Image (cartoon, rainbow, N blue to C red):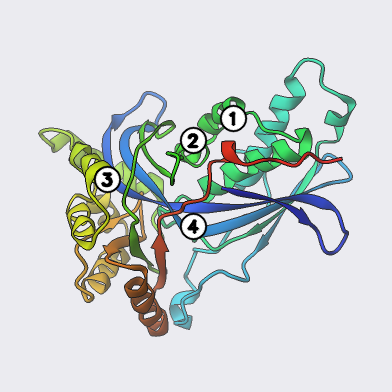
Amino acid sequence: MRIDRATRPQTGQAGWRITTPAKINLFLEVLGKRPDGYHDLDTVMLAIDLTDTLEIYPAESDQLSLEVDLSDAQVVSNQELAREDKAWEIPSHGSGLHGNLVLRALESLRQHLDSCAGASPRAQMRGAHVILKKRIPSQAGLGGGSSDAAAALVLGSLLWQDRYEPQVLGELASRLGSDINFFLEGHNGLNWTARCTQRGQIVQPIENNLAIHGLIVHPPMGCSTAQVFSLVRQSIADRKQAQSPEALLECLINLPENPHSTARLSRLLYNRLGEAAVQTTEWVQRTAQRIDRYKPYSQCLSGSGSARFCLLPDRAQAETIAAQLQREGDFRAYPFTTWTSPSILDQTIQRTE
């Protein structure tokens, strides 16, 4: 995450701005269903430079409000497909169980702060207005909602406390969702690469010496995470043993940066949810076929889909292919490179007056 001061043009209010990334899953194994209804995972996540931006400003009351800006959202130009496209149906209200995850994160933080002993009178006016500029599509498996929620926890802390407490934010994140902790704790000193286990909330940053480039292709039909996981249960029961990311981790840590390393890493990509996602919508297979036209090293589903990605030798090739796919009008296409923003712990925060 990259943190800056911000000023709201309409009012001149001082606030905070965060740029926060998407992720891809280089490896994802489902180990089994948990008593709480979630699934235990073993996944390797990489943050990439497809980003959302959030700004937060004080409110005159205790109201939490969210304004969604889709001016930079990439849309499919095929008008018939665009009518059914759910990628940018972003709720802008509701802090309850089914509300927007940004507002849920802020409400969770506010309840924590209000419960702390010796809360100051300022706590009684903890309201906020958030502007969310979306570039990461939803129902894609790219972690956009989780990334935004992590950013909201940091923003709320800066607005209401002029600081953030990583341990507190980590605990709140683990209650809100499975991927949120990665965006707070996944920095390895150079970039954001981590092995995440249990529900995904146990984050172990791992060394990654490779500059990874690639292409994300996202169809106009998303995948329901709940439906994908319900379909994958039979494959878990039928398998002989779970897959391990050890070979992929060794590749990330030890290989020098060159095209041969990228090719080798591509052969180690794995996602247990891939077959289940294909059963959810025919667009997952269509996406795979479209990527195959360009003869990449390999390709893989990200998260629970419906986006797929492939790794490529350099950014220029990814940009060329993305431009061609965007002209064809049926898919969103995003070139990407490893996200190298500093850890939030390494950034100097200017206190407000």
State the residue in front, 293 or 175.
Answer: 293
Is 67 positioned to the left or the right of 89 in the image?
right
Question: For mark 2, what is the residue?
Answer: 185
Q: Upstream in the sequence, badge 2 or badge 1?
A: 1
Q: Residue at x 22, y 62 (%)?
A: 259
Q: Three-letter amino acid code at disc 2?
A: Glu
CB of mark 2 within 8 Å of CB of mark 1?
yes
Disc 2 and disc 1: Cα gap in Å? Answer: 8 Å
CB of mark 3 within 8 Å of CB of mark 2?
no
Q: Upstream in the sequence, badge 3 or badge 4?
A: 4
Q: Is residue 82 above or below residue 158?
A: below
Disc 3 and disc 4: Cα gap in Å? Answer: 28 Å
Q: Is residue 97 above or below residue 175?
A: below
Q: Which one is in front in this view, the residue at disc 3 or the one at disc 4?
A: 3
State the residue in front, 18 or 10.
Answer: 18
Q: Upstream in the sequence, badge 1 or badge 3?
A: 1
Residue, far left: 240
Disc 2 and disc 4: Cα gap in Å? Answer: 22 Å
- Label 2 CA crowd tier, 10 Å (few <14, some 14–19, many 20+): many
Q: Upstream in the sequence, badge 3 or badge 2?
A: 2
Q: Three-letter amino acid code at disc 1?
A: Pro
Which numbered circle lies on residue 166? Answer: 1
- Label 4 CA crowd tier, 10 Å (few <14, some 14–19, many 20+): many
Q: Residue at x 29, y 54 (%)?
A: 277
Q: Residue at x 22, y 52 (%)?
A: 265
Q: Upstream in the sequence, badge 2 or badge 4?
A: 4
Q: Three-letter amino acid code at disc 3?
A: Leu
Which numbered circle lies on residue 252? Answer: 3
Question: For mark 4, what is the residue?
Answer: 138
Q: Three-letter amino acid code at disc 4?
A: Ser
Q: Is residue 82 above or below residue 280?
A: below
